[in-house]
Structure formats: C-alpha cells, structure tokens
Image (cartoon, rainbow, N blue to C red):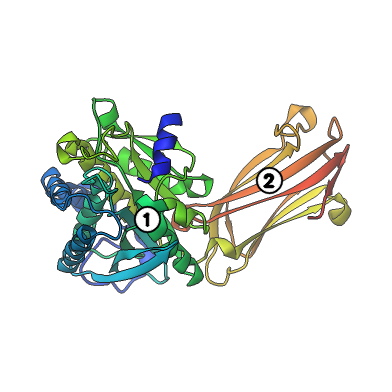
Amino acid sequence: MNFSKSITIVFLTLSLIVTTIPSFSCKDINLFPVDGEMDKLLEMIHQVNESTLKHHVQTIQDFGPHPTGSSELKKFENHLFQQFTEYGLTVVLKPWKHKFKSGDNIEAILPGIGSNDEIIIICAHYDSIFVSPGADDDGSGVSCVLKIAEIFSEKAFNATIKFVLFSGEEQGLYGSYEYAQDAYDNQENIIGVLCLDGIGYADDYRSGHIIKNYADESSDWIVDISQSVITDYNNIIELQIERFPNERISDHQSFYDVGYQTSYFLEYTINPYYHTSEDTSDKMNFSYLTKVCQLALGTAARIGEVNRLIRSEDITINFRGSLLSYPTQLIVGVINNNYKEDTASVSIHVEMKNYFTGTTVEGPYNSTSNWTFYTEITDQWEFLVSNHVYEKNELITIEVTIKGLDDDQGLYQKKSIMGIILQNLIIIIPR
C-alpha cells in the first residue's frame, strides 16, 4: 500500500485436479464441479485456516520494519524464498533497478498442464515503510500468497501460476513496474493478475463481510468469477464484493499500464494503523483475512481452469458505413484471425451514441441503437443495419465491446469510431 493510497483513502474445469495428467482434452472438462465429495475446490477452500495465516503474519511482524534496501528485508526475503522452496515450487529472485533504487522480486512458479502458455499472477508486496512492521500492509497479502501457494503446489491447473512478491512498492511500485515491463517485453501471456494488499483489517460486523474489488471494464470477468465463488460457497466465504473502477493504489497498476487484466482486493475499512509503528497483528481480524484468502484462492483456481486457444489480439473489429456498404447503412464486422485454432465464444455489444451527450441514438419507432449478441465466431461475424430513418442529424460514436464467454473467458476487445447520421445515411469518419 503505497503513499498514493492514503490520498485515495482520504478522498475516496480441464478434468478434476489429479496428480497425473489425463489423456483427454483439458478444455472439455469442468475442473471444479460443485457436487459434494467431487468438489476439489471446496477441499482447497477448507485448507485455508486462520492459524496458518496468523502464524505467517506474526513471523512477518517479527522481522520488524523491513523497507526496501534494508538488511531486515533481505532476511525476510531469504525466509520467503525458503518457504516457497519447501512447497516444491521453482523459486527465482528477479533483481530490479529503478530511479536509483534496487531490490529483488520473488517469483515462485507452478507450471501449467494446459495446451497453451497462459499465466496467472497472484501477488503482494513484501516491503514495508521504515517505521512499520507491516502486519496488514502487506503481511496480510503475503500470508495469503504463501498459503495459496502451499495449497496449489499439490494441484495441477491449465494455466501456469506465478506467485510473485514485490519489493519497492512503498517507494512507488518500483519492483512491480520492472516486473510487468519485462513480462510485456517478453510477450508473456498473462491472462489475469490478482493483487492482495491490505486485506486483513475489519473493525465491525459489516466491514468484516465486504471486500472492495478494483478492476477496469476489461477485467470485469475476473470479478465475475470471484462473485461466482462467493455464490457457490456462500456458507463458507461470507463476503460481499463491492466493485470499484481501477485505482492506481497498488502493484496491480503496473500490469494494468501495459495492458494486462487485473483485479485488486482491498479491505472495506482501511486500517487506521497502516504506515505506522502500530500496524501489528493484534489490530487485525483473522476471520476476515481467512475469508478473503479463500476468495482469492477460489478465483485463481477457476481462472486456472480456463484453457483459451485464442487471444484478445486475435479479434479484429471493423466498420463500414453507407458509402461503402450501400444499400446497407452500417456493417459491424468481427474477425477471428485465429479461427483455425478455435472458435470464439463471445458477447458483442454494439451501441451508437451522440458524440456530445453520450446518450444512445434513437432509432425508428422509439427504438434505441443499443444491441447485444451472444455468439460463437468461426472466421467472421457481421451485424447489418438497413432502412432505419433517424429523426435528426447528429455526430455519433459507434462503440463495439467484445467479451469472452465460457472457455473464452477473458477475451476482450473494444473499438469505437466516429460517424455522422444524415437521416437514413450513416457516414463513417475515417481515423
């Protein structure tokens, strides 16, 4: 939780998981059926317990303040490296340098067994500010990453899961900035980032049952998965998600800035002791932390079930207006450029808005130019508009949003273009 967060606060499956790889296709099987003894996700959720999380947080607190560059952080780093190693994961230190600061990120890797190269990041930051032992900020997030890593280490998922702990967060997201830039430069196929930072404080019943979730429109599908976990296991994970648009307040932002889809969990009531010497375990609510950790685990497990064969960049959106598609007034085309590999199961939302007011354009007979379709795209899909007589001439924006469904969850593409309505003509304005 870096300094900018305080400003914001003031103003603000594959088959069943087994130890051997089955011979049939992962994509055609539901990883986590909700059916009693066969529910492997329920089994994992039950393995998250207060005592282990409390032990991790107390251990972190006992290192004392551990800012980036300190000997205390180096000792803590060695401890975390050993923890991940004991889980049987491949552990790597990723050194970084940024603005005259330097440090190490810790990356522990659980290889995927799916047919593609998808990666999920579960992350927190392990540095604190110089006066704070960092129990909640961010011992709470680190403890959850450790516990999820321990549980997942005996499982198998389609996607590779990377458990990443950043330093340099308190200086300005330095460690995560360099990590995300490297991932982008290396074209790593990161399909989702779960960031856990400040998730262990609740001072009353209400705040102990709500978790804030920050995500932009392209990442809503991750929040939807989190909600599905709560719905399916509401007798265990007694939480309500309160959705917020993305905010630049933790390490998820570094991934967001280079185009990756992210989801950030934050406690409902901000710990008043964060960034002080009193950020200690006795101020925390470990029942609440357990529920948030269970939610993060369930979300990551269900994302890990996804085995997409096409990427968002494989989807192309194009427009043709009256001058190029006569007698049709408007054609919206969607092309699946990787159709030989797989079809694309998507929702397609098409809307025409007044450029100045943002209101939806009215069509004939009081209809609105606002359409949603659910379809499976092979090589291409088209939507045609014809014989609409509009009541007024206006400058418009035509906006198309595509979101993946089913085994294509996480696909996202959005494009808009300006146009002019002249009674029964729609003229596209070239970019």
Which amino acid, by three-letter code, is at mark 1?
Ile
Which of the two residues, 125 or 406, is positioned nearer the viewer here? 125
How much space separates mark 1 and mark 2, taking CA atoms? Answer: 28 Å
Which residue sits furthest front? Answer: 100
Which amino acid, by three-letter code, is at mark 2?
Glu
Q: Can you give x and y, in whole percent of width and height, for residue 48 in the image? A: 18, 48
Residue bearing mark 2: 399
Which of the two residues, 36 or 164, is positioned nearer the viewer here? 164
Q: Which mark is residue 251?
A: none
Residue 163 appears in the rendering? yes
Q: Assign the N terminus to one quadrant of the image.
A: top left
Residue bearing mark 1: 303
Q: Can you give x and y, in whole percent of width and height, for residue 266 in the image? A: 34, 40
Q: How many other residues sit within 10 Å of disc 1, few (<14), some (14-19) or many (≥20)?
A: many
Please determine whether, in this image, residue 57 is positioned above or below residue 152: above
Q: Can you give x and y, in whole percent of width and height, for residue 17 in the image? A: 25, 62
State the image quarter where residue 244 is shown. top left
The mark that comes first in sequence, 1 or 2, is: 1
Query: For numbered disc 2, what is the local secondary structure?
Result: strand
